Amino acid sequence: MNKTLGIGSKRARLLGVILLLLLAVTLPLIFGMNLYLLTVLVLMVIFIIYASSWNFLTYTGQGSLGHAAFFGLGGYASAIVASASGLSPYITIFIGGGMAALVGLFIGIICVRLKEWFLAMVTFGFAIIIQTLMVSQFADISGGWDGIAAPRLVPSSIPNYQLIEYYSIVLIAVFVILLFYFILKSKIGLAFAAIRENEIEARAAGIDPVKYRLFAFLVSAYFSGVAGALEIHNLGYITPEIFGVDISFWPIIYSISGGLGTLAGPIVGTIFITFIWDGLQSFGLTYLRFVIIGLLLVLIIIFLPKGLISLPDKIKGYLGKRQKKVQ
């Protein structure tokens, strides 16, 4: 099961988790209170949650081209509830996730029986519809294209509030990744693998593909909504641009570049693409970075179809072949 689900060996998992945790904890301490770096790190961790949530769909052979709908709905729901009720954003982010899951339930019941790319097109269209409604029919609530303010996750009056926000979001990300890990390690994960590999055989074994696909869709929508809520409370505002096509495509790019259908893939892909993206911007290559990221993605798909996480195995295989030739 571990191999099928891309979970990896126990030692590799433990080492990977320890290294990532050490990196996440020590980077802000090493570079001090560098606000630009902290902003990049916070958004990167949020998008790790978002990309991992999108990637969760792929374990049942599903795909989505409109996950910005759930990302944005979670953000708007959390912002509106937090502003209206005075509840802490630490509570409302999960309410935002609930709103995203509720809408996901509506879409899932209708569309989860569709093949993966038909479902993907439905979600793509839905994201466009939601964005259009937010700037027209619901402009009074959404603020139209100007958007609305959202309370910070941690009030700015608290010393080092940015650092507290960062570590809070890291803890939430660790929780989400571990939750996905335990789900995939359970009987549910076995059912996911069976459905993805051969739906007919899965049905013959008594597994209901619709039920498990709907579950995966709801979990994915929920945590995408949580990620969206975290982003807007970190930024302090939200606009309908959060439903944009680019917001739907980023988790796909991160997952494919890191390794589709693996736990580590979205994490590796998000870190890799984020640092290249912001690194190019720091060198003044703001527009050229689109071209460079596009070329990198093409090269990864051609030479590393299993993503960057397969690079060590590729290198090991190459060195092994060379060693055999020498012998």
Image (cartoon, grey):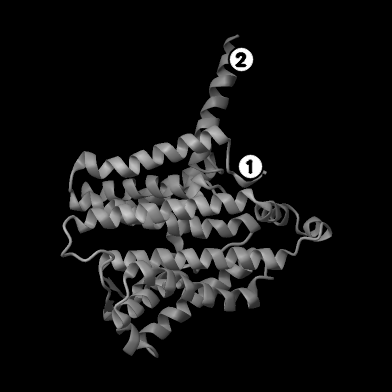
Residue 134 in picture, x, y percent from top left: 39, 83
Position of 156 relative to 48 (above/below): below
Residue marked by disc 2: 324
Amino acid at the residue labelled 2: Lys
Query: What residue is drawn where x is 17% and y is 48%?
Result: 33
Q: Nearer the viewer, mark 2 or mark 1?
A: 1
Residue 285 in picture, x, y percent from top left: 25, 50
Position of 122 relative to 194 (above/below): below
Query: What residue is drawn where x is 65% and y is 70%?
Result: 112
Residue 83 in picture, x, y percent from top left: 29, 79
Amino acid at the residue labelled 1: Asn
Residue marked by disc 1: 2
Residue furthest top as drawn: 327
Q: Secondary structure at mark 2?
A: helix
Q: Which badge, 2 or 1, comes first in the chain's sequence?
A: 1
Q: Which disc, if any, is residue 99? A: none
Residue 43 vs residue 15: left or right? left
- Which quarter shows the C terminus? top right
Residues tagged 2 and 1 counted as in contact (Cβ below 8 A): no
Give the Cα separation between the discs numbered 2 and 1. Answer: 30 Å
The answer to whether one can see residue 92 in this image is: yes
